[in-house]
């Protein structure tokens, strides 16, 4: 039984197109905070325009990574979200800080995980000669882009594709996939019981948009 809107916080480092897609999806959620490690991130502008509280913190104002992570994730925790969405958040998070969010944080990554964790996924896909590419949404764990994958969207890779054409086509799928996953969490269908569950059963394979 879902008795109140899911409280959602997001972290983003860049333009925030995934955040914009989440907002535009008009899900039964309440956005409680958007945070960033970049004061000029487009995502913060998008949040402000949507009337969502924002917070920006600058890593170099902190003595080390864990101090920054504790401060930013502390601000997120103060907003009391049910779910934290990393929507284009480009920093590696200290393991001790991530541990507090087990089962409550998801990330969208532009590859068919476990392939191509980390950066430059489109280039690596092309260099490998893959005929398929895609995006993955996973629960966040201390391992970079290594948490349990809950949903994936796929695109074909053509002979004339470049990093740019792949990124552009994949973003369209990302903008469908992330809202669908957050919607499933808001509806209580996708959840965490030490592992991802869907409709009460352990998730044995990533969901697709057709499942959501
Ligand atoms: C997206 O490809 C996302 O998968 C990755 O960062 C890129 C930019 O995201 N994590 P956005 O446009 O800032 O949402």
Image (spheres, rainbow, N blue to C red):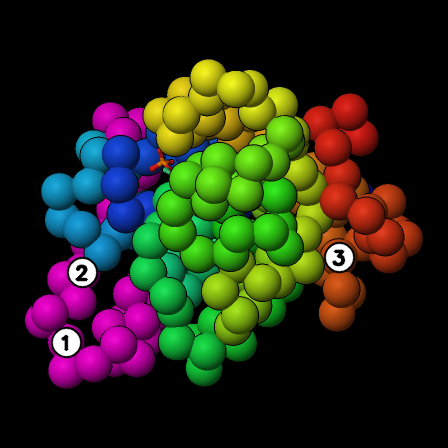
Q: Quadrant of ligand 1?
A: top left
Determine whether 149 is above or below 172 in the image. below
Give the side of residue 120 with respect to residue 63, left or right: right
Disc 3 residue lies near ligand 1 with CB under 8 A: no
| Label 1 Cα crowd, 10 Å radius (few <14 / some 14-19 / many 20+) | few
Q: Which residue is denoted by mark 3 in the rendering? A: 196
Mark 2 and mark 1 in contact? Answer it, CB < 8 Å: yes
Q: Residue furthest left?
A: 61
Depth check, front residue: 18 or 101: 18
- Residue designated by label 2: 57
CB under 8 Å between discs 3 and 1: no
Whether the magenta-drawn stretch holds residue 64 is answered as yes
- From the viewer's perspective, is 1 left or right of 13? right
Which residue is located at x 55 percent, y 19 percent?
158
Q: Quadrant of the N terminus?
A: top right
Which residue is disc 1 drawn over? 62
Closer-to-camera residue (51/197)? 197
Which residue: 17% across, 67% down? Answer: 59
**Which secondary structure dominates the residues rendered in magenta?**
helix
Q: Which SS class for mark 3?
A: strand
Whether residue 137 can be seen here: yes
Magenta residues span 46-75
Closest to the observer: 144 or 71?
Answer: 144
Q: In the structure shown, which secondary structural element does the residue marked by tag 2 occupy?
A: loop
The quadrant of the rendering that contains the C terminus is top right
Looking at the image, residue 95 lies above or below residue 124: below
Disc on the earlier residue, 3 or 2? 2
Q: Regarding mark 1 in the picture, which secondary structure is present there?
A: loop
């Amino acid at each position: 039984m879902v008795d109140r809107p899911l409280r959602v916080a997001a972290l983003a480092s860049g333009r925030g197109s995934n955040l914009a897609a989440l907002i535009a999806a008009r899900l039964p959620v309440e956005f409680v905070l958007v945070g960033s490690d970049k004061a000029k991130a487009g995502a913060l502008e998008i949040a402000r325009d949507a009337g969502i509280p924002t917070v920006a913190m600058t890593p170099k104002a902190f003595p080390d990574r864990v101090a920054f992570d504790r401060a930013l994730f502390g601000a997120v925790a103060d907003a009391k979200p049910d779910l934290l969405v990393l929507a284009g958040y480009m920093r590696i998070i200290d393991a001790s800080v991530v541990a507090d969010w087990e089962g409550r944080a998801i990330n969208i990554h532009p590859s068919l995980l476990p392939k191509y964790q980390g950066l430059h996924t489109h280039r690596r896909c092309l260099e490998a000669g893959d005929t398929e590419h895609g995006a993955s949404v996973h629960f966040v764990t201390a391992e970079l882009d290594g948490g349990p994958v809950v949903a994936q969207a796929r695109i074909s890779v053509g002979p004339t594709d470049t990093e740019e054409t792949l990124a552009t086509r994949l973003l369209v799928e990302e903008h469908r996939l992330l809202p669908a996953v957050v919607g499933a969490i808001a509806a209580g269908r996708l959840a965490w019981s030490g592992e991802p569950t869907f409709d009460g059963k352990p998730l044995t394979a990533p969901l697709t948009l057709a499942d959501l």
